[in-house]
Amino acid sequence: MIKKARELKKAGFNLEFLDFGGGFGPKYRADQRPFPLAEYAAYILDRVEGAKLGLKAITVEPGKYLVANAGVLLVAVAYVKKSYGNLFACVNAGTYNTVPRPAIYEEAYHEIVNASCVQSRKKVKITVAGHLCETGDVFGTERLMPLPERGQILAVLMAGAYCRSMASNFNLRPFPGEILI
């Protein structure tokens, strides 16, 4: 960014600001270190000041970093099935139209908890699958949780930056409802 800004300044353009965008994610897993936002900001500020570009502002776009943890997608278990030695909780929502991140990005991870049975000590590995009959319609693979039963509610966490902003009417499915608390 600074190299390009220097080139533009040399060509006669007076930049008022540089936007360093976003891309830094929130802490999706318990064992994940949080993004070092303060260090990142200090590094950018140091580099920009050293470049003497005469900017009025520097911006970043920390959207998902700020709001991912502000939303939860609640889905109901339609049925549980065992297939080829794997256990599946099939839910009343699909990734493509509610929270498409797991379907789009192979490494995407959202913790999923059995909100109807949080305290149980007995846990099983279960894959949470959507209802869209698509291979990629999987919220999470082999998640450790109390065995869900039909009608129980599962919570897909860290969904605040992804549900409404990425939702669609894929396969003519309606947008998920929203509740602001």
Image (cartoon, grey):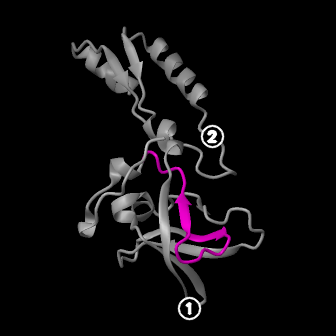
Query: Can you give x and y, in whole percent of width and height, for residue 70 in the image?
Result: 51, 42
- Quadrant of the frame with the N terminus: top left
Q: Mark 2 points at which residue?
A: 34
Q: Mark 1 points at which residue?
A: 84
* Front-lying residue, 81 or 96: 81
Nearer mark to the viewer, of 1 and 2: 1
Residue type pointed to by label 2? Pro
Q: At 43% from the left edge and 14% from the top edge, which residue is drawn?
A: 51
Q: Which residue range is magenta in the image?
A: 141-161
Q: At 74% from the left edge and 68% from the top edge, which residue is drawn?
A: 120
| Residue at mark 1 to residue at mark 2: CA–CA distance | 37 Å
Instruction: Give the number of the disc on residue 100.
Output: none
Q: What element carries label 2?
A: loop
Q: At 54% from the left edge and 77% from the top edge, which residue is drawn?
A: 150
126 within the magenta span: no
Query: Can you give x and y, in whole percent of width and height, for residue 111 in the image?
Result: 58, 58
Query: Can you give x and y, in whole percent of width and height, for residue 163 in the image?
Result: 40, 52
